[in-house]
Amino acid sequence: MRVHVISDIEGVAGIVRRGQVGGDLPLYQEARRLYTEEINAAVRGARAAGATEVVVMDCHGAGGDYDFNSLVAELLDPGCEFVIQNEWTEYTAFLEQGCDAALLVGMHAMALTADGVLSHTVSGQAWRSLKFNGTLVGETGINAALCGQWGCPVTLVTGDSAVCREAVELLGAGLTTVAVKEGIGRFSARSKTPVEARQLIEAAARESLQDLGAVKPYDPGRPCEIEIEFTSPDRLEEYRNRRDVEVLGPTTLVARGDDWWHAWSSFFF
């Protein structure tokens, strides 16, 4: 069994403030360790479930040299390999080769989620909302669509209670989730301890891989239309002249393709 662990940092237990998620900030070094150990828990669970190959992909844009490079390499479980991307959603080789399941670790809720800890979609400064064929999604939806493009189901989502709710609404009741914290506000939460969070994630990762048919691969639909609403007109400008993109208004554009991947690729890279 081949398992992809796709991760972000905002949904990790104990991480609640902006100062913990930016690569140039002092608290980030502690956050990196918390992040890496939750991923290790998912790797252990996958291995216990019979995974023969586990590839971890860091999807946190921390800025600078830490962009998609936030894992503490020397702390990573030796039962995995890991990917350092230059751009988010750039690495698809493992999925293209055939992947049995994906585990999404450390996820956060979409922008404007009232009880979502550090909630945003792609860029908290630039993106207001994102829709796939009319369905409002966040970064869990992006990662699920990426996996689904190559027939890989997401079987586990971990993060705060808001993203767990969001993920079940999108992917169905067969999805396994672990809520490691509950948002009080965007920058506050009641959190499980790191040790308990890791225990829960390890057990859930193992359990989620017992029935690979419990969650279908996510396909937003074919053809696919992606609609992005930006926070201000200037944020839209960099995408204006890309292929298969239509500007609908001062802050809104749509990208279209035969499937999700072609629509996404037409403007994101």
Image: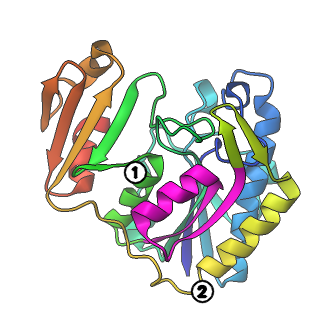
Instruction: Judge the density around disc 2: few (<14), some (14-19), many (≥20) Cα neighbours within 10 Å.
Output: few
Q: Position of residue 204 (x, y in %)?
A: 68, 73
Residue 222 relative to residue 268: left or right: left
Label annotation for residue 17: none
Q: Position of residue 66 (x, y in %)?
A: 64, 32
| Quadrant showing the N terminus | bottom right
Residue closest to the eye, 127 or 9: 127
Residue closest to the eye, 233 or 103: 233
Report the magenta residues as a range: 153-181
Residue tagged by mark 1?
Answer: 142
Any part of residue 126 in sight? yes
Can residue 19 be found in the magenta stretch? Answer: no
Q: Decide: is 149 above or below 260.
A: below
Comes first in the chain, label 2 or label 1: 1
Q: Decide: is 178 above or below 91.
A: below
Residue tagged by mark 2?
Answer: 210
Quadrant of residue 255 within the rendered picture: top left
Residue 262 relative to residue 159: left or right: left
